[in-house]
Amino acid sequence: MKQDIHPQYHHDCKVYFRGDVVMTVGATVPEIHVEVWSGSHPFYTGQKTFVDTAGRVERFQRKFAGGYFGKGKDGGKDKSAAASAPKQ
């Protein structure tokens, strides 16, 4: 095995959730900051919470507002009329 190619391993990496240490794990970084962990996840706690990171919901609504799904590459032409016409 080659020497000096592996990252430094920290046996006591602290995992932070909302400023509090929630657990200690082994990792290649000395500390990890998380937005969701098993103690706050709705699947494990049974509580319903809403996580909106950096306005993802608003960005999605702006992107797909205004009939985005109604438009096709052909400019909105009806393909069903062309498909039902008899071929010669």
Image (cartoon, helix red, strand yellow):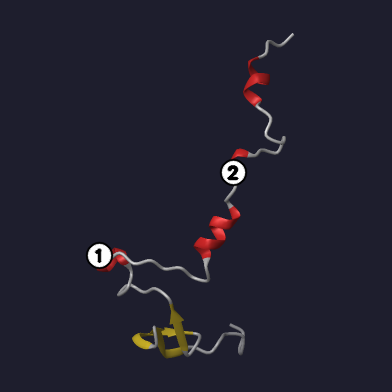
Residue 42 picture location, percent across and down? 31, 66
Is 35 on the left or on the right of 5, as rendered?
left
Label 2, on which residue? 67
Q: Secondary structure at mark 2?
A: loop
The residues tagged by marks 1 and 2 sit, at their Cα atoms, a distance apart of 36 Å
At x 67%, y 13%, the residue is 85
At x 59%, y 43%, the residue is 67
- Quadrant where the image shows the N terminus: bottom right
Is 70 on the left or on the right of 21, as rendered?
right
Q: Residue furthest front?
A: 66
Q: Secondary structure at mark 1?
A: loop
Task: Establish if 24 lies above or below 47.
Answer: below
Q: Nearer the viewer, residue 36 or 50?
A: 50
Residue 40 picture location, percent across and down? 32, 73
At x 43%, y 78%, the residue is 34
- Quadrant where the image shows the C terminus: top right
Q: Amino acid at mark 1?
A: Gly
At x 70%, y 38%, the residue is 73
Q: Nearer the viewer, residue 61 or 4?
A: 61
Which of the marked residues, 1 or 2, is nearer the chain's N terminus? 1
**Closer to viewer: mark 1 or mark 2:** 2
Q: Nearer the viewer, residue 9 or 2?
A: 9
Task: Establish if 79 lies above or below 41.
Answer: above
Is 67 on the left or on the right of 29, as rendered?
right
Q: Residues within 10 Å of mark 1 (few under 14, many from 20)?
A: few
Q: Amino acid at mark 2?
A: Gly
- Specify the quadrant of the image occupied by residue 75: top right
User: Residue 4: which disc?
Assistant: none
Label 1, on which residue? 46
